[in-house]
Amino acid sequence: MDVIEINNLTKYYGKERGIIDVNFNVQEQEIFGFIGPNGAGKSTTLRTLLGLIYPTSGSAKIFGKDCIKHGPEIKKEIGYLPSEVFYYDKMKVIELLKYSASFYQKDCSKRINELAEIMDLNLNKKIDDLSFGNKKKVGIVQGLLHEPKLIILDEPTSGLDPLMQQKFFELLQEENNKGATILFSSHILGEVQRLCDRVAIIKEGKIIQLQKISALQENNYKKIKVQTTANLDHNFFNIGGVSNLEVKQNIISFLYRGNLNLIMHKISEIEIVNVWIEEPDLEEIFLHYYEKGA
């Protein structure tokens, strides 16, 4: 079952591009990654999906229901953490969280205390006295206090120290194990690689790749480095399947996608001192997709 269905979703801000023909589905109990640098269209996609802004064209469904027509009903089962959080500064944390809980018509007191303990959040402090990282913790508790079926996170770890990030990831994994579906937007590749099952890569408002994390890493690319006996012409490895080519005197490194026999035959044409072939990390793969757009 698809919890999220996005079909040709497009948003323009006047003449300025937001997103163009975005398509992807998120399956029930999946942790789905949505990656791209700032300005690529991640937040616009999420805000349109949540009905916070209206699409220019296309459609989006959550739990099989149109996000615009059934927005208020759908939102009761969604936990959302925006990339930036803003609150009433004079309120205490507990006052804000109780106010948030009142919208769900259920007693969330026990849940609030559990989450605050996990996130090491002082409930009695005023919002105005909190650091940026602690305000982000408030947002995390606020987004999870009603035990939503769908959790949508937009750059959720900014402001959190490494120890708190670790606790947050463990919390998300627990929620997922209990049945929650998670849409995780980030520009930090390590987070996506660690948490997500599948990933959509967005560039300049368009989805350029949609794949399983494992498929991005396994068998698609090899990271090859060759040390030669003499300096080599930069164009020697300028062949199909080669990308991210770097030449530093007599050491050549590149990503290769294709038949390994062909690239090994090419290497055999030169005098070499050493050769290394290994799996690239996700960031190198991502940069290749982002530069090439395919």
Image (cartoon, rainbow, N blue to C red):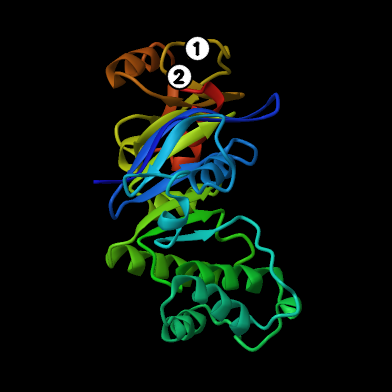
Q: What's the residue type where badge 1 is placed? A: Asn
- Residue 250: where, in percent of width, then height? 56, 24
Q: Residue at x 65, y 62 (%)?
A: 85
> Disc number at residue 133?
none
Query: Splitting the image into 4 quarters, where does residue 209 fall?
Result: top left
Relative placement, left or right, of 109 versus 196 is right
Q: Residue at x 58, y 72 (%)?
A: 137
- Residue 89: where, in percent of width, then height? 75, 75
Split into 4 quadrants, where in the image is the C terminus?
top left
Callout 1: 10 Å neighbours few (<14), some, many (20+)?
few
Q: Which residue is mark 1?
A: 238
Q: Which residue is mark 2?
A: 242
Nearer to the camera, 98 or 280: 98
Q: Are marks 1 and 2 in contact (CB under 8 Å)?
A: yes
* Label 1: element kind: loop
Inspect this view and state whether residue 268 appears.
yes
